[in-house]
Image (cartoon, coloured by chain):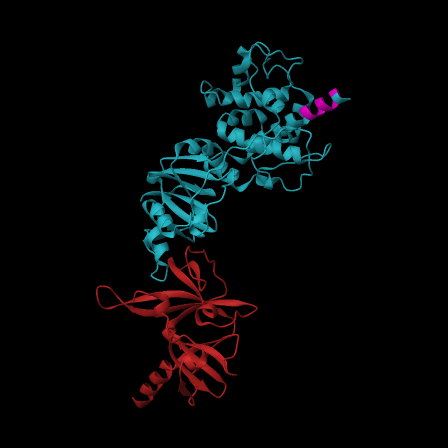
Chain colours: A red, B cyan
Amino acid sequence: MQAERKDKKKAAMKTVAVRMANSTQGREPALLFAARQAEEVLPDAEVHPLPFAPDWLLGLSTWRRQVLPVLDAAKLYGFDAAAGRHLYLVLRTAAPAAEGGRRLLRCLLKIPSQISARELPAQCAASSAAENGLDPALIKGVFAHENGLLIVPDLLPALCPAA
Amino acid sequence: MKNICIVQGGRFLLGISEQDILGRMLWDEAAPLLRQDGSAVVQLGALLAQQPGGIPLPDAVCLELRGFFLIVDQIVANGVELINPPGPLPPACPRLAARLCPQVTIWGDTPVLLLKSTQILPVAEELGKGIGIVTIPEPEKESAAVLEPEAAVPCDCPADATAEEEPPEEFFAEMAVPDESAETEELPSAAEEECLAFVDANEPSTAPAEADSCASCSADEPETPAVTDSKSKEEEKFASEHPPSSEQQKKDAAAIDEETFQKVMVWTVACFKRCKPGEKLRLGVEQLPPELAAMVWQKGLSKNIIQYLIDQIVLRCQESAGRRGKHAG
């Protein structure tokens, strides 16, 4: 029973880390998503532009017969554009529904190709978004560890500004 | 919204309910009418890119909507039935986009924003600064040089040829059915007759099934001998180079409407004029400009028919150029 709980806890800590191009105060930043949040990694996506969109909103794409917004991670979170290949990460997040309860929102996040599944490092300290030059409205939390900076983004303000 | 028309405006692909479209016309034809009409004219591509309306390309399409006109770069598909029920635009989309296109559907594998036509003018007004609004320019005087058939330039990219250039007047004269008062110095060749047959085929009195006797439609005209009487060497050569039955193609050609005929002819002649003198022009259906190709496809005309038409026009152009050379000599 105890072992089962331990396994569950370990599974909950599984994450997907996306290394971003530039460094923040000498530390390599990575965007961190819960593994259950990431549904698929696509090598490519056909993106159709959307009128009146900000630069971080690249357009719309179809995924499994759904129309999803395509977001540029570097532009949204204020990192330099990475050279080379890009991937598209299908992410989901829960948002409050108008009629109460919650609904799932999905998006495609354009990311650099340096992506890995990892566990949270045991030794890390909470840091603040503003301290690291990040927009606090878009960040849930920042954790500093010896190898770099782990940034947990909040997708909701980008995916559902009204919420 | 049952059927939609999918249009392209700048970088954007949008769907408009067929019910909202009252009429459509090429910009070239619509501009003089709109100049007098005084209705608002919105250029979709410019509006969506938040830029003031420019001068639309001659092959842009002008759609008449309720109370105003909308210029789109091209019509991508007509009468598209919505298989996937439209859904709301994702909440991440900008407010103006959601106002202009509250719904989105999937066409093939492409998301298509469904335009709410009643919101076009209010959005343009909200943006202000003349964004998306077209000011119709005054007509330009036609330059004689444009009509000069000798102005030939190298033909390296026929698909780029637009309908801007008019075919030489002589060409029109030769392609038209001769009227009784017109005196012709020489009898038209069989190739010419086939071009005439195309023109005749567009006459309402000529049913497609009667296309076999299409040439005889012009037999009422005194100077026009029946095409079936004799075949010129050129025609025989053409027939040997094109194994599919040319008689059948001639029959099918009756299905070509006047608009298609005119556009294919203008494009072919423009391509011919771009060729160096003496260079053999090879034009294929696949080289048609996208808008023209789309139109042909939409009308369900087969490639063979259009290829036949192109070949005939090229042949006529070559003969015409040859005669000019002889006269000059």
Is residue A160 placed above or below B208 in the rendered structure? below
Q: Is residue B274 magenta?
A: no
Q: Residue at x 72, y 32 (%)?
A: B277
Which residue, as the protein is rendered here, is positioned at the far right? B329
Where residue B114 sits: x, y (%)?
36, 49
Q: Residue at x 70, y 34 (%)?
A: B280
Residue B256 visible in this rendered orientation of the protein = no
Image position of B304 (left or right of B317): left
Where residue B133 sits: x, y (%)?
42, 44
Where residue B231 sits: x, y (%)?
65, 19
Q: Quarter of the image for the C terminus of chain A: give it.
A: bottom left
Is residue A137 placed above or below B286 in the rendered structure? below
Nearer to me, B288 or B168: B168
Residue A60 visible in this rendered orientation of the protein = yes
Figure quadrant of residue A14: bottom left
Where residue B290 sits: x, y (%)?
53, 42
**Magenta span of residues:** B319-327
